[in-house]
Structures are given as C-alpha cells and as structure tokens.
Image (cartoon, rainbow, N blue to C red):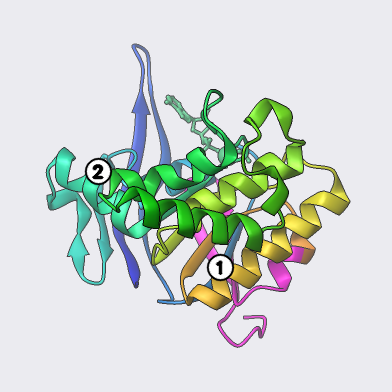
C-alpha cells in the first residue's frame, strides 16, 4: 500500500509555548519493501509513526493510503482501517500479560471476526514460523525478551497487513537477539510483500534496506538512500 504524506505538521502545545515537532513534511513511501527512518533522539520519529498509523492526529496536513486520506475517516473507521491494514510493533511489546502467546497472536484475527478455529490455526502457523512452536501456551512473563518480541511480530503480521510500522522493535534486546529478530521481520516483510517502515538507531540495518530517511529537528525527512540502494 502506498503511503503519501502531504504538508504534515504536528505541534504540541502546553500552557506556555508551542513545540513544532514536524513542520510541513511532504514525502512518500514505496508500496512494498523496507524503509528505515533514522535520526537523533527527540527529532520526531515516534511522532511521525503515530501520525502514519493514525494513532494520533496531525495539527494539519494529510496522510494518504493508496490515495485515501485517513484524516477524513471517523475515529471508528480509523480504528477499523488500522486493524485491517496496519501492523504495529513497538520497542516494548505490549502483549497482554494474562493471555498466552497463542491467544495474543490470535487477537487481531478474532477482533476482525475470523472464526476461532481458523484464527488458532493461522496463529499456530505464524508462531511456528517465528520459532515458537513449543511456546504457544506460555504467558508473556514465561518468555524471554527476544521470544516476547517474536510473539509481538507474529501478532503484528498474522492478519497479513499491507503496512507494518515498527518503532525501534528491537531496541530493548541484546545485539545478537536484535539482529535475529530483525532478520525475521525483514524475511516476513518480503514473503508477505508488505511495506515495512522501521525506526532504528542501527545504521548497519538501515543501510541494508531499500530506502533510508533521516529525520532532522523540525521533522525534515531527508532521503539518504533510494529504492535501488544507491546513496542519494
Ligand atoms: N505528547 C507530547 N506532548 C508534548 N511534547 C511531546 C509529546 N510527545 C512528544 N513530544 C516531544 O516531541 C519531540 C519528538 O518526540 P518523539 O518521541 O517523536 O522523538 P523520537 O525521534 O522518537 O526520539 P527517540 O529516538 O528518543 O525515540 C520530543 O522533543 C518530545 O519531547
Ligand atoms: Mg521514539
């Protein structure tokens, strides 16, 4: 799915002043493949991801999916759009603590009205794919950090969303585990033919992707590497 951003502005306001995090950003992302967003802390990467994922509303400007402006949708329609088309992976997994790995993964399917048998089957399949065939009935507290993050990836991808938004998805893992989880995420992005937008501080990972943007203060997004992997 093609994501286009036009004149996007996000300002936070408190009693005393206004903070412009993103100012008139216009850019577009390819309709499949993996895109990295890098940049210093506080430059607005997470803010942008929240706007792209319709988790937050811009002060002004538009985010379009295949030409359709998500800001034109009601909040119920936005929630339905998110559930159908977008998979989210965050630095901390946000798994439901009282649900097993399998139940956590099945949740997006169950919410979308998939029959229980089919939801379980597809969740088992994808958990096996991320190497957790023998951890299905474990609770999050009974899983290691890397395992929890793999469950979060399985949950984000089980409904085969067209777009995956990953905000430092391996930020709380050790280097070796992080690299394993990143490889898995990229492999599944290729298999499913989705668009993956990943915020990362790992420049080596960023360079290995199809496109790299660097976020600067004020929300300017500068393309560093184009779709052919050439540096621009
Ligand atoms: N709800 C909010 N209210 C006020 N200011 C906010 C709010 N959310 C974020 N900010 C400010 O916006 C700026 C950008 O924050 P954001 O979380 O997008 O940065 P980031 O690039 O993701 O940083 P990091 O790499 O540390 O995760 C920061 O200066 C932050 O203090
Ligand atoms: Mg952030």
Looking at the image, which is closer to me, 179 or 168?
179
Which labelled disc corresponds to residue 60? none
The residue singled out by tag 2 in the image is: 79
Q: Is residue 61 above or below residue 29?
A: above
What residue do we see at 13% from left, 49% from top?
73
| Residue stretch in magenta | 205-232
* Residue 120 left/right relative to 174: left
Q: Quadrant of residue 57?
A: top left
Q: Is residue 110 above or below residue 183?
A: above
Q: Is residue 96 above or below residue 183?
A: above
Looking at the image, which is closer to me, 210 or 78?
78
Spatial CA span between label 2 and label 1: 24 Å
Q: Residue furthest front?
A: 117
Determine the quadrant in which ligand 2 lies: top right
What residue do we see at 67% from left, 40% from top?
148
Q: Quadrant of residue 94?
A: top right
Quarter containing the C terminus = bottom right
The residue singled out by tag 1 in the image is: 35
């Amino acid at each position: 799915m093609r994501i286009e951003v036009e004149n996007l502005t996000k300002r936070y306001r408190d009693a005393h002043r206004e903070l412009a995090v993103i100012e008139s950003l216009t850019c577009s992302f390819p309709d499949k493949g993996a895109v990295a967003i890098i940049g210093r802390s506080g430059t607005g990467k997470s803010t942008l991801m929240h706007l792209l994922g319709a988790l937050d509303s811009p002060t002004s400007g538009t985010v379009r999916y295949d030409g359709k402006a998500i800001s034109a949708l009601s909040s119920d329609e936005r929630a339905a759009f998110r559930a159908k088309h977008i998979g989210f992976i965050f630095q901390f997994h946000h798994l439901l603590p009282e649900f097993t790995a399998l139940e956590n993964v099945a949740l997006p399917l169950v919410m979308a009205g998939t029959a229980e048998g089919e939801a379980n089957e597809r969740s088992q399949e994808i958990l096996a794919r991320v190497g957790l065939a023998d951890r299905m009935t474990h609770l999050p507290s009974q899983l290691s950090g890397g395992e929890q993050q793999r469950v979060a990836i399985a949950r984000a991808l089980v409904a085969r969303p067209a777009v995956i938004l990953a905000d430092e998805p391996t930020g709380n893992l050790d280097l070796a585990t992080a690299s394993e989880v990143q490889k898995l995420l990229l492999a599944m992005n290729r298999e499913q033919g989705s668009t993956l937008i990943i915020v990362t501080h790992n420049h080596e990972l960023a360079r290995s992707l199809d496109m790299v943007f660097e976020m600067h203060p004020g929300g300017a997004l500068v393309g560093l590497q184009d779709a052919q992997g050439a540096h621009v």
